[in-house]
Structures are given as C-alpha cells and as structure tokens.
C-alpha cells in the first residue's frame, strides 16, 4: 500500500516524505517532480501554456500510476481538488494530512527559494486564505490520520507518522 502525504503547499510533504523514506528504506515519490520530469518544463510554465485543468488531468493520470506502487507519495497540495483523486486516495492509500496553520505555511513558503508556486504568485494574504481555507475540510475528509506539523521538525513528524502507521 502507498502512504500519501497531503496538505497545502509548504506543509512539508516532500521533506517529511524524504525523512520517512530514509527511516524506512522505502522509495519516496514527489508527484510534482515526476510531472516536471514528464513534461520537461516547470509546472508554472505548464500552467501558463495549458491551464490548471490540463495540469490536474495530468496529475490524475500520474496519481493513478503511482498508487499502484508501494512507497511514500507526496503530491501537490491541490491534488485533492478533483473528486476522482479524492476517491482514489481514500480507496488505494493510507493518507496522512500534514496540518499546518496559515501563518506557518506563509513563513515556510516565503523562505522556500527552491519551489515556485504558481497558485501563489502575486497573491495577497487574503487571496492565499481564499485558496487555503476551502481545502482544509477536504484534507480532513480524505485523511486517515491528521498530524499538526506546526513547530515540529520533519524528523518529529516522521516519527509520529511511523507510530501511527508502522513501518
């Protein structure tokens, strides 16, 4: 079975996934990175050229592929926006929601110089809230486990996940 880490951008899905992979000798898959590798361009460019709907279709196709493997999957924060993806995650994976308060997410995103976030580009805090807040109940609905990541290190979060789901 696949362990899937969900949460808003900046929640630490990839970082925690990497820590878990190291602790369990399991492979970790960053779905967004796999998409970038497949399309040969940054997601932001793909968004600009093809739109969010086309990106979400590609994301669903790749999600289906990776749910058939065992390991740790870290999808983008918006993977939960499609009903099909919600059903796939609930039926085919153990899902852990990395719950993080908005102030902490904004701090992490601001400090992240590696990842460009197309949905947050040139957005005010109010606009980010408008994206973030409606997703919270969806994350909670899909999750088998919810972990508050605020003020925890990736190692501490990984340890909590291992206690909940085993290794």
Image (cartoon, helix red, strand yellow):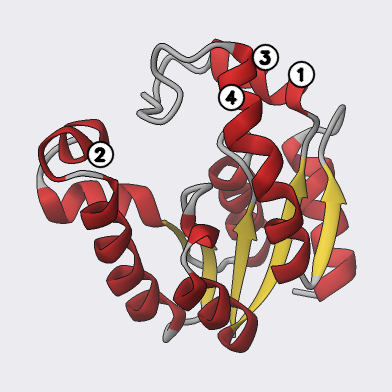
User: Pointer 2: what residue?
Assistant: 43
Left or right of 63? Residue 49 is left
Q: Secondary structure at mark 2?
A: helix
Total count of labels: 4
User: Pointer 4: what residue?
Assistant: 128
Mark 2 / mark 3, whichever is N-terminal: 2
Left or right of 108? Residue 115 is left
Of tags 2 and 4, which is closer to the observer?
4
Q: Are marks 1 and 2 in contact (CB under 8 Å)?
A: no
Residue 80 percent across, percent down from the top left: 54, 61
Of tags 1 and 4, which is closer to the observer?
4
Q: Secondary structure at mark 4?
A: helix
User: Pointer 3: what residue?
Assistant: 107
Left or right of 150? Residue 29 is left
Q: Quadrant of the C terminus?
A: bottom right
Q: Which mark is residue 103?
A: 1
Q: Residues within 10 Å of mark 1 (few under 14, many from 20)?
A: few
Q: Is residue 3 above or below residue 97?
A: below
Of tags 4 and 3, which is closer to the observer?
4
Q: CA distance from mark 1 to mark 2?
A: 25 Å
Of tags 3 and 1, which is closer to the observer?
1
Residue at point 85%, 33% (across, down): 152
Residue 101 percent across, percent down from the top left: 80, 30
Residue at point 10%, 38% (across, down): 49
Q: CA distance from mark 4 to mark 3?
A: 13 Å
Q: CA distance from mark 2 to mark 4?
A: 19 Å
Mark 2 / mark 4, whichever is N-terminal: 2
Q: Residues within 10 Å of mark 2 (few under 14, many from 20)?
A: many
Q: CA distance from mark 3 to mark 1?
A: 6 Å
Q: Residues within 10 Å of mark 3 (few under 14, many from 20)?
A: few
Q: Are marks 3 and 1 in contact (CB under 8 Å)?
A: yes
Residue at point 76%, 56% (across, down): 137
């Amino acid at each position: 079975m696949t362990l899937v880490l969900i949460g808003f951008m900046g929640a630490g899905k990839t970082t925690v996934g990497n820590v878990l992979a190291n602790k369990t000798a399991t492979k970790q898959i960053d779905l967004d990175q796999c998409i970038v590798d497949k399309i040969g361009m940054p997601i932001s460019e793909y968004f600009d050229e093809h739109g969010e709907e086309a990106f979400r279709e590609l994301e669903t196709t790749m999600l289906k592929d990776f749910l058939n493997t065992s390991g740790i999957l870290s999808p983008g924060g918006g993977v939960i926006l499609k009903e099909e993806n919600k059903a796939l995650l609930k039926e085919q994976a153990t899902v852990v929601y990395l719950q993080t308060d908005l102030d902490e997410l904004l701090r992490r995103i601001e400090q992240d110089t590696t990842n460009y976030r197309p949905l947050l580009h040139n957005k005010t805090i109010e606009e980010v809230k408008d994206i973030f807040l409606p997703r919270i109940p969806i994350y909670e609905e899909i999750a088998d486990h919810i972990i508050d990541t605020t003020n925890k290190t990736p190692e501490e979060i990984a340890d909590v996940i291992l206690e909940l789901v085993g290794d």
